[in-house]
Image (cartoon, helix red, strand yellow):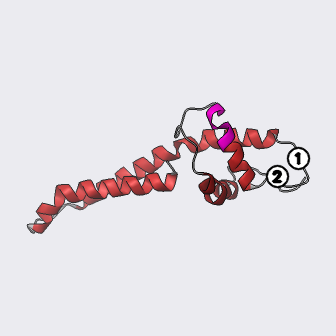
Amino acid sequence: MHLGTAYHVGRSVAIWELKRKYEPAAKAGLDIPRQKRAGGQARAAQIKAAAAGWYKPATDWLQSLIDAEPLGAKPLSYSRLAGIIHDGWDERGFSEGPSEPPEYLYLAKTLLPRWEKDGLINRPTTA
């Protein structure tokens, strides 16, 4: 499950749970305490943090794969890195995160560029 998806699912579930619990009271004109509404945000943040738990081991593993790649004439592209992740996911050496790798396009277009921008991986761009 992707971090963004996990966050949105968690937020949706939390909102649904709060709505189911407090909507009848709100319709009856009763005031719902602010801290009760904030509980959904806390739950969504908790789910997001749990989904982010696999980033550190995943980026460490990916950096070791990047470092092991011989420098060629072409830079190591995000697409190639996404393929490396998919090919080696079962031998990744850590158990955190999903049992299946993130979707290929999500890796190549969103996650890998973000990881590089955030300094979590260092991808050589020249030989």
Q: Amino acid at mark 2?
A: Pro
Q: Quadrant of residue 108?
A: bottom right
Q: Tell which of 29 and 68 is nearer to you.
A: 68
Q: Quadrant of residue 58?
A: top right
For the image, the number of numbered tags is 2
| Span colored in magenta | 86-92
Q: Quadrant of residue 69?
A: top right
CB within 8 Å, label 1 to label 2: yes
Position of residue 51 relative to residue 116, above or below, is above
119 in magenta: no
Residue at the image point whose x is 62% and y is 56% from the top: 105
Percent across and percent down for residue 92 are: 65, 34
Q: Tell which of 31 and 19 is nearer to you.
A: 19
Q: Tell which of 125 and 78 is nearer to you.
A: 78
What residue occupies the far left of the structure in this picture? 28
Residue hosting label 2: 124
Residue at the image point whose x is 82% and y is 52% from the top: 124
Residue hosting label 1: 71
Percent across and percent down for residue 86 are: 65, 43
Percent across and percent down for residue 4 are: 49, 56
Q: What is the C-alpha distance between the residues marked 1 and 2? A: 8 Å
Magenta portion: prevailing SS class: helix
Disc 2 is placed on an element classified as loop
Q: Can residue 36 be seen in this snapshot? A: no
Q: Is residue 103 left or right of residue 73?
A: left
Q: Residues within 10 Å of mark 1 (few under 14, many from 20)?
A: some
Percent across and percent down for residue 107 are: 63, 53
